[in-house]
Image (cartoon, rainbow, N blue to C red):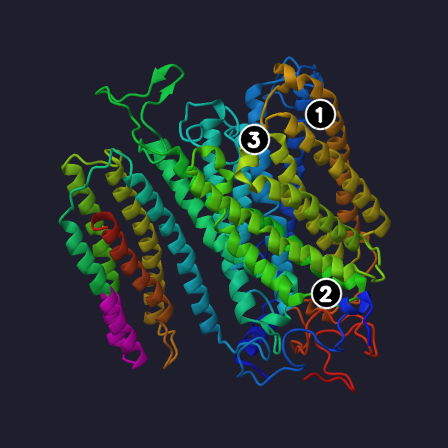
Amino acid sequence: MAMTPTEILERRDPIAGPGGPLGPRDGHQDGDGGDRPERSPREIARFGVWLMLGTMSMMFIGFTSSYIVRRAAGDWRPLPLPSMLWVNTLALLASSVVLELSRRALKAWDLPGAQRWLGMTGILGLMFAAGQFIAWRQLAALGVFLSSHPHSSFFYMLTGVHLVHLAGGLAWFAASYAKLRRMAYAPGEDGLGLFAIYWHFLGALWAYLLLLLYVL
Amino acid sequence: MAHAAEAHAAEAHAHAAPTAFIWRYVFSKDHKVIAVQYYVTAMIMALVAGILAMLIRIQIAWPEKDFGWLGAIFPMGYSGGVMNPEFYAMLFTMHGTIMVFFVMSTAPVSGFGNLLIPLQVGARDMAFPMLNGLSYWTFLPACVVIMASFFVGAGAAAGGWTSYPPLSALKGAIPGSDMGQTLWIVGMVLFIASFTMGGLNFVTTIVNMRAPGLSMMRLPLTMWAMLLVAILGLLAFPALTAACLMLVFDREFGTSFFLPTGIVLNNTPLLRPDGTFVHQGGSPLLWQHLFWFLGHPEVYILMLPALGITSDIIATFCRKALFGYKAMVGAMLAISGLSFVVWGHHMFVSGMSPYLGMAFAIGTILIAVPSGVKVFNWLATLWQSRIIYTTPMLWAMGVVSLFISGGLSGVWLGQSAVDIQLHDTFFVVAHFHLIMAGAALFGVFGGTAYWFPKMFGRLMNEPLGKLHFWLTFFTYYGTFFPMHYVGITGQMRRLYDPYQYDWLKPLQGINEFITVSAIILGAAQLLFFVNFFWSAFAGKRATENPWNSNGLEWTTPSAPPHGNWPGEIPTVYRWPYEYGTPNAPKDHVMQHEPPLPGEHRD
């Protein structure tokens, strides 16, 4: 049967919307048909946290490309590495390890253990923050200040921005610690899971910044 | 099929509807209230930025005429009835900044996004209602800070909406570079923070909280647009945050991220006590790269909601299935992806390598392909349909018209050879006002008339809406179409007095025409404000589904109650464009209607 131009543009199939066959599926099939995803509030929150880390990463990618561009200018001078940074790095890595211990203790419903390890996470985090100030003082003692040269500008700025994000992590720590003391977590709940994602991100970010500033 | 999250949300909402006025309408966590807050704030900002535009146009048409009465209203901007050049620079800077970020990124995205996402995906509210409320209460201070800059120190920022250094990085460069620029940066950072909170909510809600049966490929195109807009915002805005921070360091702490060696300000070199330059080796172009890495995705943040809204409206009022749904989704994905690799086309004159320029030019022109797909699909939907000319439909067709007119000049400008000639002329101003500003604005007006029932439970006045449309449509073209000619003739944008140049003197007549058209355009918008507020309080009561549409938002009362559906969340059986299906027993089949007798699909 010959088609008129109108018919060519019209859908011949009477019920041909995209999105798979009519009706909700059982919810186990992926692809473009079927059911909505089955997600608990915690899974949804976890998704949100990862998304937030994505947008934060983009900011540091922005800083990274600026760093690479700026380094190509003629006035680049390498910066001495304050020895305190090694201590700080170890403290932050250790804080991630004890956080995992706390998480496991909480899952095993060992509340005093969870509280002890979580407290250590916070203390190590605070030590890192204090150590960063000491590192700044070490550089200043060498006569290297924020506006001395581009590498020092990036060093102070990036460590500062990282510290601001760490302050957010410490606030989250305080809230989690208070909740743990109130025993507001349910047995079997991975109550520190979301905080752990963010805290480990801070550690990884710090390792990356150190790499960017001194190795790359 | 009871579901843990849904049961939890339903339960939370069952006893969460606050009764005190302040928690219900001011510090609300309900997405519908937040949407209206965003929308109305954006419209007030639009009013301000529109007045700035009128002043700009008056200056371009009659630069030396004595406007004593304007001087009386704006004493800081006029001396002896004639506008100060510094004030003119503040006007175009703040017009651009407010319109791009505080109006056209806010009304379509934060306004309609918040209103429609839970309603169209079938959720009780956004994923993180608290964050959503916080987002608005970060946005409002951003508006206050930006507006306050007119009233402090030497006035608002005046380095252009792009805030290129060194004007933006040296406090003493021009009057607006001091406190005005500082407030610009603070306002922008607050805005980005608020947009980020919104974006996290948008993506999380659309991806995770869809109603049973609502697969991604059954989403209305408005939802696809909102999803992509939020992703663009989350990925692109951080570059500007980083840039703003470096700018603050350059301004306040003497660093040299963007400032090169050898800066001389008002005939005085900027020197340290030891005789070396304060700023050394920085790159002003670095700011431009960071700014436009945001800036280009940003124009699609403005555009995409309008494209989605247009698709929904056109299908409804053609009573025909939207043509090429999958291609429409693909086109929006392609536009979003390409938007990240074309920022260099704003910088063809910056001395970039011609090979790099070529790459940016090709990427830019490629955007015409998905854009063409969208236009073709709209036209194919319109083709031989019985169009119902309601106000939303008129606006949607206006979007299609502007998208074509503005898109064609975009293909032109995308070629570096042409762009270098036309860069910074009124041709560019004409181009982006048609496509980015105009199409987005028309989309907002169309969406407002279409979804007004879901905001206020009433319909907007149709005759008044149509009058507003026709006046806006003709004066919009009347304003921006002749601008192409002005631009090709060589008039640069941001010129305080174009007629200092002899070859621009003959353009005064056409500039006067544009200005008169712009003033009528501005005045016509008052009709919208009258219609909006009158209809919100005294318009015709709307039924649940006044336009006989198919989406989930039309399955709940107008305006929807707290928690969105009085009963259970509907289950979705089909896509949202089931209009006039051949052999179907009814004119339209809504998304939540189970298969009809005899209906089947292989």
- In the rendered structure, which amino acid carries the disc numbered 3? Gln
Question: How far apart are the alpha carbons under marks 1 and 3?
Answer: 21 Å
Q: Earlier in the sequence, mark 1 or mark 3?
A: 3
Q: Which residue is mark 2?
A: B322
Residue A158 is situated, as x and y percent measured from the top left of the image, at 30, 46
Residue A200 is situated, as x and y percent measured from the top left of the image, at 30, 64
Q: Which residue is mark 1?
A: B511
Kind of element beneath mark 3 = helix
| Residue range corresponding to the magenta coloring | A96-120
Q: Is residue B226 left or right of residue B356?
A: right
Image quadrant occupied by the N terminus of chain B: bottom right
Question: How far apart are the alpha carbons under marks 2 and 1?
Answer: 41 Å
- In the rendered structure, which amino acid carries the disc numbered 1? Asn
Kind of element beneath mark 1 = helix
Magenta stretch contains residue B188:
no
Q: Is residue B148 left or right of residue A206?
A: right
Looking at the image, which residue sits at the far front?
A: A2
